[in-house]
């Protein structure tokens, strides 16, 4: 096993806490949870609705994957955190699912939480795997 490699990318959203955007350990890639912050201007407030926030989060994750020369096809697992679980679960699922082919959906956990950084509605993290 090689030593983990820690990545922070200028193209990705500015971290809202002390973390790397991704950590690579051998063929495994661990992506830090992203929230719907604008990668070009951290001061822009998040949209008010769950669909727009989910799309921004997924787009942010794609930025990180692309910086590692990976894509969503490499994602094997994700975790979704929702602050308004009952209200937003169905709409979030529709937006989330639109990013993957129906026969290549990652394993996933979805959790209702009391709060997220910056009072956003959704955060998603991922685990990807490079071809060995």
Image: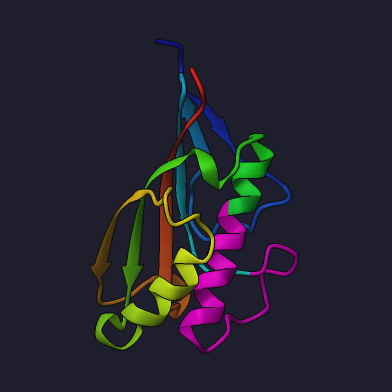
Residue 64 vertical position relative to residue 38 in the rendered view, above or below: above
Total numbered circles: 0
Q: Is residue 53 left or right of residue 113?
A: right
The figure's colour scheme reads: rainbow
Kindly identify the residue that appears in the image at 59 percent across and 69 percent down. Answer: 56
Q: In the image, residue 81 lies at what x, y percent?
A: 33, 66
Viewer-side residue, 43 vs 90? 90
Residue 36 quadrant: bottom right
Q: Is residue 120 above or below residue 96?
A: below
Q: Residue furthest top?
A: 1
Observer-nearest of 120 and 27: 27
Q: Is residue 21 visible?
A: no
Does residue 51 appear left or right of residue 56 in this picture?
left
Q: Position of residue 44 (x, y in %)?
A: 67, 79
Q: Residue at x 72, y 48 (%)?
A: 10
Camera-side residue of 10 and 18:
10
Query: What stretch of residues is rendered in magenta?
Result: 38-61
| Snapshot quadrant of residue 42 | bottom right
Confirm whether residue 42 shows in the render: yes
Query: Residue at coordinates 58% horizontally, 84% vertically from top-left?
Result: 47
Residue drawn at point x = 44 percent, y = 57 percent: 102
Q: Is residue 80 above or below residue 52?
A: above
Q: Among all residues in the image, which is located at the extreme front?
A: 103
Quadrant for the N terminus, please: top left
Q: Is residue 27 magenta?
A: no
Residue 52: percent from left, percent from top: 56, 80
Between 14 and 78, which is closer to the camera in this rendering?
78
């Amino acid at each position: 096993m090689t030593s983990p490699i820690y990545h922070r990318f200028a193209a990705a959203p500015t971290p809202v806490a002390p973390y790397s955007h991704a950590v690579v350990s051998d063929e495994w890639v661990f992506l830090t949870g992203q929230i719907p912050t604008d990668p070009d201007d951290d001061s822009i407030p998040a949209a008010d609705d769950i669909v727009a926030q989910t799309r921004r989060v997924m787009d942010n994750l794609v930025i990180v994957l692309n910086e590692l020369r990976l894509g969503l096809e490499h994602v094997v697992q994700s975790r979704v955190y929702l602050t308004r679980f009952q209200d937003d679960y169905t709409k979030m699922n529709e937006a989330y699912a639109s990013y993957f082919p129906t026969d290549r959906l990652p394993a996933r956990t979805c959790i209702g939480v009391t709060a997220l950084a910056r009072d956003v509605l959704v955060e998603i993290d991922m685990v990807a795997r490079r071809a060995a």
